[in-house]
């Protein structure tokens, strides 16, 4: 099941981004004492008492026809659509305002569970001011301070209590869950139809015409698969189409449920920055990846075109150099037969487990060839032994004398040696250094 979604909404300048940053533990959202700084939705993951969830930070909701304010309100409404629970942030120092009441009416229409974060309650003597916010009629108010992290535990307890109950799917362990991600109009729906061999998904040349994300199971050559289509959208089609960011949360949800992710590029248009951002979500989630260059039939080419395009991909997607590339056409089914065998290969790599003694032989050989680094004082990294602790993605722990001595360059060197020895085609691998206890 995909993680539930918590959307942080409210009028401008009430401290939404400060609370967002506090919940995710890093300064991802811009924080500035100026209304309208956060203009787009920002997504991240959070965790509280074994509950994992997505968090959306939004620009402030403000009822105005001014273009920027209208766009911010549109973004917030999209976030509300996608949310399972809404955190409505208000400014406790200022008290309840007419703008807060307008936001509350919008939230009432959403029919979603709401918790109210009465922010900037740094002084406990001010906490009685939260009671006036009960009159908004949308949820229970909690006194919090985003800047100091006060009261957020109780707020999160209430939010998590309203998350939908977890429910697994009915697919067997051997089923490969496959999702397609990419910017609008790269041919994801056409590719789904081509893989399935039938018209199961609406296809149009207009970006954003896939209305719902649907799981589609199928079987091919004694292997079970399920395709998770990520392009779906539910309501306010034109609103979703007005921003390239509308599909991000859908993609995150689908990636979260997937074993293998197809990053679909447009062979005609080439690579743009948005492609790299979308691919980065799959990499950060630790999913197996295949890069698919679609519409290859429409590209004017000679004997060097494919090699040149592949070189561009490797240059632009250096963080994903492990991912195989498949050139195909969903329209003509050119080279489509190559795709599922590659999917099977990367799925196998994603779940590969290496014996500890074999892994340590590879590490010893790597250290013998290129000795471990030292710090400025001459202290050398010592790797005592290594072991694999997880699959999907393959995760290795190195027990060392000092984890700080494992520099990025040597970390990369060890990863390259592990890949050279075992393959791990199409999957990220994780290497974690831990201090060996006495």
Image (tube, grey):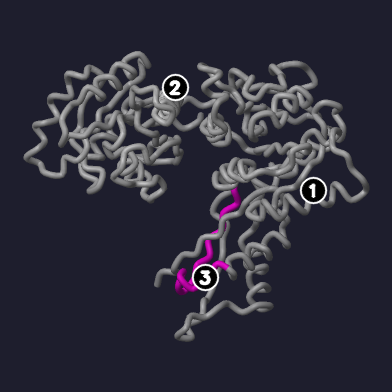
User: Which label was assigned to residue 81?
Assistant: 2
Say whether residue 67 is left or right of residue 395. Answer: left
Q: Residue furthest bottom?
A: 378
Count how many numbered circles sit on residues in the image. Answer: 3
Quarter of the picture holding the C terminus: bottom left
Q: Is residue 372 left or right of residue 302?
A: left
Residue interval drawn in magenta: 393-408
**Residue at horizontal 85 percent and vertical 33 percent from the top:** 298
Q: Where on the picture, by quarter, is residue 171?
A: top right
Please state the horizontal and vertical placement of residue 34, each as a whole percent of the image.
31, 42
Residue 173 x/y as whole percent = 62, 33
For residue 29, say whether it is visible: yes
Would you name the residue on which mark 1 appears? 309
Q: Earlier in the sequence, mark 1 or mark 3?
A: 1
User: Of helix, strand and loop, which one carries label 3?
Assistant: loop
- Drawn side of residue 271 relative to residue 11, left or right: right
Q: Position of residue 276 (x, y in %)?
A: 62, 45
């Amino acid at each position: 099941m995909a993680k539930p979604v918590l959307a942080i909404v409210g009028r401008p300048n009430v401290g939404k981004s400060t609370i967002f940053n506090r919940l995710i533990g890093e300064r991802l959202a811009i924080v500035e004492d100026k209304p309208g700084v956060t203009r787009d939705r920002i997504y991240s993951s959070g965790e509280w008492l074994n509950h994992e969830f997505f968090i959306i930070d939004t620009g402030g909701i403000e009822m105005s026809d001014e273009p920027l304010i209208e766009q911010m309100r549109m973004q917030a409404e999209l976030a509300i659509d996608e949310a399972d629970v809404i955190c409505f942030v208000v400014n406790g120092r200022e008290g309840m305002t007419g703008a807060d009441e307008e936001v509350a009416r919008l939230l009432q229409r959403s029919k979603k569970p709401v918790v109210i974060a009465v922010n900037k309650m740094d002084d406990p003597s001010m906490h009685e001011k939260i009671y006036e916010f009960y009159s908004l009629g949308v949820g229970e108010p909690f006194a919090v301070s985003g800047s100091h992290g006060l009261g957020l535990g109780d707020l999160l307890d209430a939010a998590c209590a309203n998350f939908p109950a977890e429910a697994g799917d009915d697919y067997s362990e051997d089923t490969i869950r496959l999702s397609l991600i990419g910017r609008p109009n790269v041919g994801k729906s056409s590719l789904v139809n081509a893989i399935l061999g039938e018209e199961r998904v609406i296809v149009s040349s207009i970006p954003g015409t896939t209305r719902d994300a649907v799981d589609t199971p199928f079987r091919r050559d004694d292997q079970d698969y399920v395709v998770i289509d990520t392009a779906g959208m539910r309501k306010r089609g034109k609103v979703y189409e007005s921003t390239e960011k509308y599909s991000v949360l859908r993609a995150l949800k689908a990636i979260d449920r997937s074993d293998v992710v197809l990053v679909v590029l447009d062979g005609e248009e080439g690579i743009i920055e948005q492609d790299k951002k979308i691919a980065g979500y799959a990499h950060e989630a630790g999913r197996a990846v295949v890069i698919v260059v679609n519409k290859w039939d429409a590209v004017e080419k000679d004997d060097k075109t494919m090699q040149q395009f592949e070189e561009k991909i490797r240059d632009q997607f250096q963080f994903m150099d492990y991912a195989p590339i498949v050139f195909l056409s969903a329209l003509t089914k050119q080279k489509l037969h190559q795709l599922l065998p590659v999917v099977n290969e990367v799925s196998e790599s994603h779940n590969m487990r290496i014996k500890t003694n074999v892994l340590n032989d590879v590490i010893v050989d790597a250290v013998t060839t290129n000795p471990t680094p030292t710090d400025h004082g001459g202290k050398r990294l010592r790797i005592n032994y290594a072991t694999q602790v997880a699959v999907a993605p393959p995760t290795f722990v190195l027990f060392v004398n000092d984890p700080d001595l494992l520099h990025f360059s040597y970390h990369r060197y060890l990863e390259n040696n592990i890949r050279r020895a075992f393959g791990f085609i199409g999957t990220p691998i994780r290497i974690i250094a831990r201090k060996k206890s006495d």
